[in-house]
């Protein structure tokens, strides 16, 4: 497929964005993300392992391997998007054990070590493309492979591997300790979705063109998708989120129609939206904290009802149709809020979970989905494959340096390369610098502390436990501080394996600089720039929007034939495409390269125009849902075909820089207006909403085309 021919923007290389990103990442501090309860629980698991190692007088290698298994298993329990179930630490520790086994068996032969490290790096980086949680686990497996020779100095690889698994089993037991928080990740995700909808309602009260937040709605479905059993109210509450959003958008659209001619009524409707946002914030608080809120649900809803205009059910000569439709949409929103409030109460009360699907079917389905995803990555041009090959080359060189390094702690070259290298520039450069600086600071502090405790095994074990707890606590708060803490943990863990902590601090500091620099250098030599992916990702989003437009306009033309399954599929496709584009645009914004348009800012402009068109389609979808028994409308199907072709033309323009056809949306809109001008009284409301929203849809698509066309002209 030909690449876009949009001219490049200037300058071609810039260092200001990466510099700002590095500075911001180092200073980033998010204490609200700390999970002290989970940190204490995970720290109790590794403390139990350390105590058992001292009491049972484990060999130093076995003690270190067991601590490594417990440490990595505890980290898995603290990944934000992962539900902390007891089976997870056992699974992670088993993977760590396999890595230690392979690393220990290959340790006697430098050539075998090089080959195993290279193959393991490719495999772990490739599998890590399945998601951030999987990537964290595969990175831990890479670290375990590097440290395997340390763990197997005085025990066999099999014994060290079993020790790592034992550490994971201890963490699994610790995960069962109180306090128990029923459905915590799912409830928190639902609360965040409610807050996102509240933010949308507040913003739409002032500006109809505000971009809608969709990621939180995607997150809650993904979090719940991890569970085999879910309480019925929670399932219903999540299913209702998009109905709530559609109702909010419909009220905002009704307000926008009245701003010019009826500003007083528009202000009343804006108050409804603000009251709606307050009610949603209250629901979020109730679901997240499981305690009664300061104000009653019904009070929140009644305030919104009192603020609403109250026209009659049907239009007459004295009440304009826009007022009637506004009243109907407000009542629809109130019904949705009332339903949501009842569901939120039931979620907070903790009704028992019901099985969605058997565990066997669920596991089989998940494995099948992941396998298909990995198969799609078997392409030399895919970011996952590029990252896997880059990781293999980096670790191969790092392992070669480790073998030739004259010092005792040369494995920190490969270890730092494992931790630093990521699939995108933003994560690699940001985490690389934080890792290097954090390691230097942490190793210095731990080196000073080692003078006090290095000769006492009990105090050394206590230091390991303290650093482990600090690591668990700071992992979601600051990667820079976390890196410093991990340096101290690793240094004292090596002391348990029989090395001098002072020597380890010095050697590890130098090796960290070499390993981190190596990872950054390999990314610079063969980068995966997200900027280059933006055209394809934007085109995929446009295609998803086009499919949604076809389904919605088909439902407007033939209400009785509305395909709910197809509608859900198109909405899911939009969510996925928009999530991928947003993530890539965010990463591209800090890349040092500039070249062919679109850049991240260009994508944001186009996405904003596409979102305006999507809001019109959301209103039309809600309108069609309430008219399933309505009559067919002439001309809508033809207009839907023209809109679908317009989306295809936009996607082609983004992908190739040219388009083979020209779509006259104004002509298609005129033909639609002529077709729906006359009709019976039963379709009057549908025809008026269709008239208003198709105008907005057409203008938004024309604006999108102008934005994309502007990329082909020199600035």
Image (tube, helix red, strand yellow):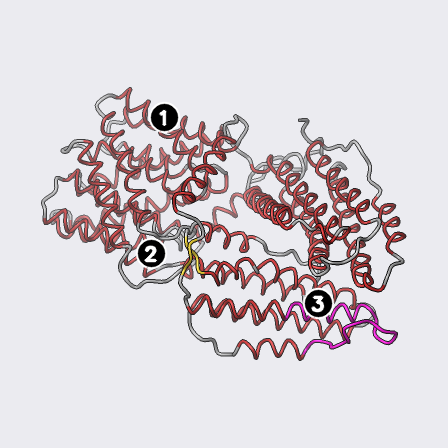
CA gap, disc 1 to disc 2?
33 Å
| Relative horizontal placement of residue 629, taking residue 158 as reference (left or right) | right
Image quadrant for the N terminus? top right
Indicate whether residue 100 is drawn in magenta. no
> Residue tagged by mark 2?
473
Q: Which residues are magenta?
A: 307-334
Instruction: Tell me whether circle 1 and circle 2 mark residues in contact (CB < 8 Å).
Output: no
> In the image, residue 494 lies at what x, y percent?
21, 41
Instruction: Tell me whether circle 3 and circle 2 mark residues in contact (CB < 8 Å).
Output: no
Most foreground residue, 138 or 513: 138
Q: Tell me which label, 3 or 2, sits earlier in the chain.
A: 3
> Residue tagged by mark 3?
329
SS class, disc 3 = helix
> Residue tagged by mark 1?
118
Residue at (88% x, 48% y) in the render: 671
Label placed on residue 260 = none
- Tell me if I can see residue 16 in this picture: no
């Amino acid at each position: 497929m030909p690449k876009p021919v949009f001219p490049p923007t200037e300058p071609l290389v810039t260092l200001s964005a990466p510099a700002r990103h590095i500075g911001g990442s180092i200073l980033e501090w998010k204490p609200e993300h700390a999970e002290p309860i989970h940190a204490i629980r995970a720290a109790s698991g590794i403390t139990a392992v350390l105590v058992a190692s001292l009491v049972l007088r484990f060999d130093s290698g076995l003690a270190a391997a067991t601590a490594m298994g417990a440490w990595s298993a505890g980290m898995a329990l603290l990944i934000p998007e992962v539900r902390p179930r007891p089976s997870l630490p056992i699974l992670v520790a088993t993977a760590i054990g396999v890595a230690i086994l392979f690393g220990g068996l290959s340790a006697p032969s430098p050539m075998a070590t090089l080959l195993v490290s290279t193959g393991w790096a490719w495999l772990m980086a490739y599998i890590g493309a399945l998601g951030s949680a999987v990537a964290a686990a595969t990175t831990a497996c890479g670290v375990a492979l590097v440290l395997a020779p340390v763990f197997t100095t005085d025990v066999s690889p099999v014994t060290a591997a079993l020790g790592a698994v034992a550490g994971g089993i201890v963490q699994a037991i610790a995960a069962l300790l109180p306090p128990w928080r029923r459905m915590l990740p799912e409830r928190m995700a639902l609360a965040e979705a409610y807050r996102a909808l509240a933010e949308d309602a507040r913003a739409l009260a002032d500006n109809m063109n505000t971009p809608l937040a969709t990621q939180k709605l995607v997150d809650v479905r993904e979090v719940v998708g991890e569970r085999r059993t879910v309480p019925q109210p929670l399932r219903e509450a999540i299913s209702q989120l998009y109905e709530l959003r559609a109702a909010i958008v419909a009220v905002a659209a009704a307000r926008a129609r009245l701003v010019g001619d009826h500003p007083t009524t528009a202000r009343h409707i804006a108050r409804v939206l603000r009251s709606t946002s307050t009610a949603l914030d209250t629901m979020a608080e109730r679901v997240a904290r499981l305690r009664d809120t300061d104000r009653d649900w019904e009070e929140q809803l009644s305030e919104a009802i009192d603020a609403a205009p109250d026209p009659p059910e049907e239009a007459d000569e004295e009440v304009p149709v826009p007022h009637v439709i506004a009243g109907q949409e407000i009542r629809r929103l109130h019904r949705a809020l009332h339903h949501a409030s009842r569901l939120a109460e039931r979620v907070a009360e903790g009704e028992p979970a019901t099985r969605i699907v058997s565990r066997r079917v669920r596991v089989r389905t998940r494995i099948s989905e992941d396998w298909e995803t990995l198969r799609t990555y078997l392409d030399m041009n895919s970011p996952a494959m590029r990252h896997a090959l880059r990781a293999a080359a980096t670790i191969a060189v790092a392992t070669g340096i480790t073998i030739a390094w004259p010092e005792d702690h040369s494995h920190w070259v490969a270890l730092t390369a494992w931790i630093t290298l990521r699939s995108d520039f933003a994560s690699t450069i940001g985490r690389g610098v934080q890792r290097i600086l954090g390691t230097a600071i942490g190793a210095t502090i731990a080196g000073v502390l080692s003078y006090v405790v290095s000769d006492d095994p009990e105090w050394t074990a206590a230091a390991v436990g303290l650093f482990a707890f600090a690591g668990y606590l700071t992992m979601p708060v600051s990667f820079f501080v976390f890196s410093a803490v991990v340096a101290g943990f690793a240094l004292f863990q090596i002391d348990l394996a029989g090395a001098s902590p002072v020597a380890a601090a010095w050697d590890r500091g130098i090796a960290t600089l070499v390993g981190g620099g190596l990872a950054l250098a390999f990314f610079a030599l063969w980068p995966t720039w997200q900027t280059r992916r933006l055209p394809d990702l934007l085109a995929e989003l446009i295609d998803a929007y086009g499919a949604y437009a076809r389904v919605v306009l088909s439902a407007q033309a033939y209400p009785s034939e509305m395909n709910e399954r197809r509608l859900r599929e198109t909405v899911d496709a939009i969510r996925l495409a928009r999530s991928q584009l947003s993530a890539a645009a965010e990463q591209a914004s800090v890349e040092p390269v500039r070249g062919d348009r679109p850049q991240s800012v260009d994508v944001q402009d186009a996405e904003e125009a596409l979102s305006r068109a999507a809001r019109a389609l959301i209103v039309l979808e809600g309108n069609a849902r309430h008219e399933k028994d309505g009559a067919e409308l002439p001309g809508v199907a033809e207009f839907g075909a023209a809109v679908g072709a317009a989306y295809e033309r936009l996607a082609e323009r983004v992908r190739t820089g040219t388009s083979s056809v020209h779509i006259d949306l104004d002509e298609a809109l005129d033909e639609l207006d002529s077709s729906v001008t006359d009709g019976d009284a039963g379709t009057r409301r549908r025809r008026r909403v269709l008239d208003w929203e198709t105008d907005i849809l057409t203008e938004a698509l024309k604006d999108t085309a102008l934005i994309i066309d502007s990329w082909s002209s020199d600035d």
